[in-house]
Amino acid sequence: MSNLILNQKVTGLSTSEQTDQVPGILTQTLAHPSRSSKYSVVTSMNVIKMFEDAGFIWKLVRQENCRKHYAGFGTHLIALEHPDIRFEDKELDKEIIPRLFFLNSYHGRTPLKLDLGIFRTYCENGLFIGAMLETFSKKHIGITQESIPQVVLEMKKVFSEKVVPLVGSLMENELSESTQLEFAKAALAERLRSNEAYIGGQYEKLLISHRDEDKGNSTWRVLNRVQENLGLNFRGSPVEVMYSYTAKDENGQSLVKERKVSKISNIQEVTHLNKYLFEKVMEINSNTSNEEQKIAA
């Protein structure tokens, strides 16, 4: 029990019994009126209880600000953490904590989903592991109490066999200035991919370090700086990054305008970008390692 209490103090996670006021979105038991009778509701509190029975603690990370029509039925994200799923490597265990991210809704626009992720202990950044390592994606009716122990086993296996060597490699491998700029440029382009008129922006600002722990040229440090500076931690806004795009004036003539990158409120978009960054940095890390091997040979 002592480990559980300690983890709560560090991460802000809790159990439902220890939470004085459970947010209303978690106690919702009905589907939105727009859903048909065939729509199967999986209540978040029931899922949380199942994970609690398996030793997990949890935290509501974010709930979407719905229009009045969907208020109380919207998409929400919960972080789940198990005290027995830790890294044996002391350096990794001090740096990051494995988590499971549970996404749900009652309006039918978001399926129930479980994603693997990691949580940085000293800055509260939550990184979603990319699709290359994603092992849990359930349909809206696919999770039962009996399936939870298997989830725990799969989490332990994935983290021990894949995440530990991967993150270790990211921490050891250093990126050149040009490669860092390449990564930052790709990250900003993906963030603004919905703007077809996007030309370019101040992507180099995504590499700025705001704390001593994030200084350095390792792939891991670069990833975390870009992730935080884009505002992908569900807490803060992005750093002030201006970008340019083409537009039309009142006479229909083309011109270039500038705008500041805005904060993202959509939970699924933040999740997508987190995964994109993880997969992109893995690709860069792999390419860099291959180049080093060629030079050594």
Image (spheres, helix red, strand yellow):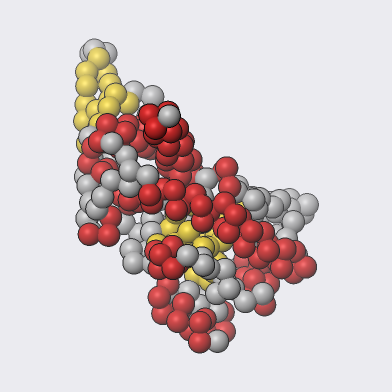
Horizontal placement of 219 versus 161: left or right? Answer: left
State the residue in front, 226 or 270. 226
Report if residue 60 is visible in the image.
Answer: no
Tell me the quadrant of the picture where the C terminus can be found. top left
Say which residue appears at 52% left-offset and 45% top-offset: 130
Say which residue appears at 51% left-offset and 67% top-offset: 88
State the residue in front, 241 or 124. 124
View extreme (front): residue: 297
Query: Count of labels shown?
Result: 0
Horizontal placement of 290 versus 200: left or right? Answer: right
Residue 131, horizontal then vertical, whole percent: 57, 43
Name the quadrant containing residue 90. Answer: bottom left
View extreme (bottom): residue: 2
Horizontal placement of 71 versus 108: left or right? Answer: left
Report if residue 225 is visible in the image.
Answer: yes
Residue 102, horizontal then vertical, whole percent: 58, 59
Q: Give the answer, above or below, for where 56 lies relative to 291.
A: below
Name the quadrant containing residue 40. Answer: bottom right
Residue 203, horizontal then vertical, whole percent: 26, 36
Residue 152, horizontal then vertical, whole percent: 66, 65
Horizontal placement of 142 versus 72: left or right? Answer: right
Say which residue appears at 33% left-offset and 43% top-offset: 174
State the residue in front, 264 or 210. 210
Say which residue appears at 28% left-offset and 55% top-offset: 214
Tell me the quadrant of the picture where the N terminus can be found. bottom right
State the residue in front, 151 or 221. 221
